[in-house]
Image (tube, rainbow, N blue to C red):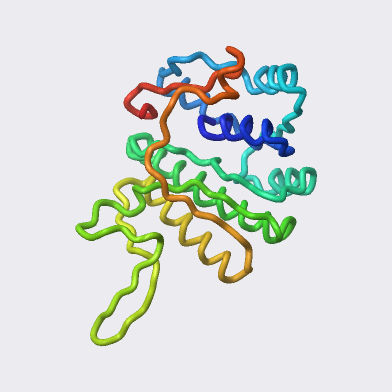
């Protein structure tokens, strides 16, 4: 994906052994919607081959759906990750609001996929650190400052610190809220490690690595569904 490809090259360039897990469903969305990236992108196979040619570094590739736990189990057992950077979600709020089927797909893909990743870490790589991409949209637009994850509240003379309230505005954003709750619960129950990033819109055309060759170029979406 857009974030994943750039991250994979960056980490590989730093000397990490990197594996890509991808269902390739994002390219199917373009076919469904009749849209395309402004910067034509090569196939994943050709991208990985070109990176090996330029850098001498090999990217492992596992093509499959993280909602399929048997596939994910095989990938974890084969690669034995020390860290997982999890971008494997449907990322468009407008897409999630188009109709019932896309709302259901978004929730299922994002929430079930993340639960599977959590169980895979617990069962096969318990020392693994999960880095999960969320969104600032989880918080909505409250009329008070948004705190860093937690907020301390005094009510009827009693005080407690709890997760900051979430007010999502789409089925996509709600899927991220569910992810955050599931990740927090898994960390508490299983003592696994996770960083749940709630960042703003990610944008940009190139990185030092994707600029090395035309076949490494990242996508640039400009349509009303996936464009920034």
Q: Quadrant of the C terminus?
A: top left
The residue nearer to you, when weighing 160 against 167, is 160
| Residue drawn where x is 77% and y is 48% of the image | 80
- Is 81 above or below relative to 1? below
Decide which of 129, 69 is in the foreground and name it. 129
- Residue 89, how many percent across, how many down? 51, 41
The x and y percentages for residue 85 are 59, 45
- The picture places residue 58, in percent across and down from the top left corner, at 76, 28
**Residue 40 at x, y = what percent?**
51, 14
Q: Residue furthest left?
A: 143
State the quadrant of the N terminus.
top right
201 displayed left or right of 55: left
Apparent side of residue 48 relative to residue 131 in the rendered image (left or right): right
At x 35% / y 64%, what residue is drawn?
Answer: 164
Task: Point out the residue furthest to the right here.
Answer: 78
Is residue 83 shown above or below 2? below
Residue 81 or 70: which is nearer the viewer? 81
* Along the viewing direction, whichever of 128 and 186 lies nearer the viewer: 128
**Count of numbered marks:** 0
What's the residue at 72%, 48% (across, down)?
81
Establish if 119 lies above or below 34.
below
Tell me if 43 is positioned left or right of 89 in this view. Answer: right
Which residue shows up at 79% across the image and 44% down it? Answer: 78
């Amino acid at each position: 994906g857009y974030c994943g490809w750039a991250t994979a090259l960056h980490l590989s360039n730093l000397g990490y052994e990197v594996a890509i897990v991808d269902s390739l469903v994002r390219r199917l969305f373009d076919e469904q919607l009749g849209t395309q990236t402004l910067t034509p992108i090569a196939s994943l196979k050709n991208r990985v081959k070109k990176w090996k040619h330029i850098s001498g570094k090999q990217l492992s590739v596992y093509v499959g759906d993280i909602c399929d736990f048997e596939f994910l189990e095989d990938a974890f057992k084969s690669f034995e990750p020390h860290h997982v950077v999890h971008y494997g979600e449907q990322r468009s709020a407008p897409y999630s609001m188009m109709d019932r089927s896309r709302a259901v797909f978004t929730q299922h893909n994002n929430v079930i996929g993340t639960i599977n990743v959590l169980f895979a870490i617990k069962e096969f790589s318990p020392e693994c650190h999960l880095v999960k991409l969320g969104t600032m949209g989880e918080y909505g637009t409250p009329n008070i400052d948004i705190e860093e994850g937690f907020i301390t509240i005094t009510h009827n003379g009693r005080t407690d610190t709890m997760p900051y309230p979430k007010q999502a505005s789409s089925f996509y954003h709600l899927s991220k809220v569910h992810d955050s709750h599931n990740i927090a619960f898994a960390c508490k129950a299983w003592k696994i490690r996770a960083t749940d990033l709630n960042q703003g819109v990610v944008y940009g055309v190139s990185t030092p690595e994707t600029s090395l060759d035309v076949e490494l170029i990242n996508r640039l979406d400009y349509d009303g569904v996936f464009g920034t």
